[in-house]
Image: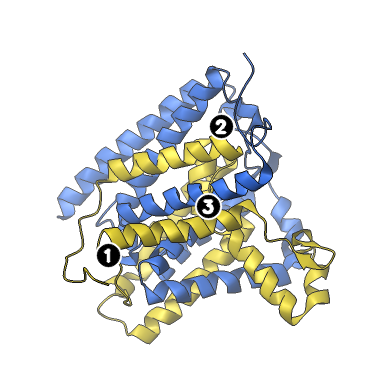
Amino acid sequence: MTSIAPLAKTAFLDPEINLALATLIGFGFGFFLERAGFGSAKKLTDQWFGKDWAVFRVMFTGIVVAMLGILTLDQLGIMPFGSLYLNSTFLLPQTIGGLMMGGGFVIGGYCPGTSFVGLASGKLDAAFYIFGLLIGAFVFAELWDLIEPYLQIGSMGKITLFQYFGVSQWLIAFVVVLIAIGGTMFANWFERRKG
Amino acid sequence: MSDTNNTPKPYWPNLAAGVGLGLVLLASYYVAGRGLGGSGATARVTAGMMHLVAPEHTEGIGYLSKYFHDGVLNWSNWLVFQIIGVFLGGFFAALTANRFIPQVEKGDEISKKERFGYAVLGGGIMGLGARIAKGCTSGQGLSGGATLALGSWVFLIGLFIGGFVTAIFFRRLWR
């Protein structure tokens, strides 16, 4: 059976329509972020003080749903996993960047995607946060020559967890589901304990 | 707004919002073969603003040169169109749930000015961090997480450690 997805890569889709659909997909993304309560910096930062684990639960629910869909469509031959964009692995930059994203999240109140939902909900502080995002990108661009060599440290190319551990993708998927369920049970217990 | 008398509706349960988010992410892969991004468009906007002030300098920066073709910034980018959608979708959702309320959200112990300062600082740290990690909570966390990219799971672990540890020192901001 020939694969039919991703539509933009199997020539089912004009580049212009792909861009139009990007806005539609973004619309859905923004809609569900807002419905989750993520247009509110207070709701978001409650995660980091252990008061409300919505960020963890929503994020991991989303990861699990998309992951199971992607692996199933690959298994059925409809959408080959190898045709999807995969983030390259750079261990040091992703560790440092990840720590900075967590730290900045607490201080700024949003993450980049949710700040646009915050702004769309009328939050003036989100506008200042987005201004900060631009400054951060500016600093990065100006320092590019200086930091570029360090961004290659721990480079491992496009590699998945199941390739790295040499196991079935379904075993890793099972572990991710366990992390999501276990983490949610822990979160529920933690909230009750505090509550 | 005509329905300002109406009180905001409750948020959706985490599971329902998470399933919706996951299906949108899956649709993104199905249609475009790529995941969602929150910060990619901001780098392009930054490049555009820098280009207005110092065109030659900006095009000369290795990281930004790929955005320009013959001295013109290429705006027809997937993430740019996607983030416009995020704003519109968030606006529509906020309006229909009576949650569009102009305000400054902050903890009780800090002033509005302090909140704005910390928002710029946190945004700055994340703007820089997202470029270093080649993606943000959306591009690395959600999208890389769902495609089981090794480095994206390293990023996710860093994100949660960074958040919980930083929270110990910044309790005053959100109390």
10 Å crowding of disc 3: few (<14), some (14-19), many (20+)? many
In the depicted structure, whether residue B55 falls above or below residue B14? below
Q: Could you tell me residue A100's position as x and y percent? A: 52, 61
Chain drawn in blue: A
Separation of residues labelled 2 and 3 (CA atoms)? 31 Å
Residue that carries the numbered disc 1 in the rendered image? B99
> Within the image, what quadrant is residue A13 found in?
top right
The chain holding disc 3 is: A
Spatial separation of the CA atoms under disc 3 and disc 1: 22 Å
Find disc 3 in the rendering and name its residue. A23
Query: Where does label 2 land, which residue?
Result: A161
**Dot 1, crowdedness within 10 Å: few (<14), some or many (≥20)?**
many
B29 horizontally vs B55: left or right: left
Q: For numbered disc 1, what is the local secondary structure?
A: loop
- The amino acid type of the residue labelled 3 equals Thr
Give coordinates of residue B95: x percent, y percent. 31, 63
CB atoms of marks 2 and 1 within 8 Å: no
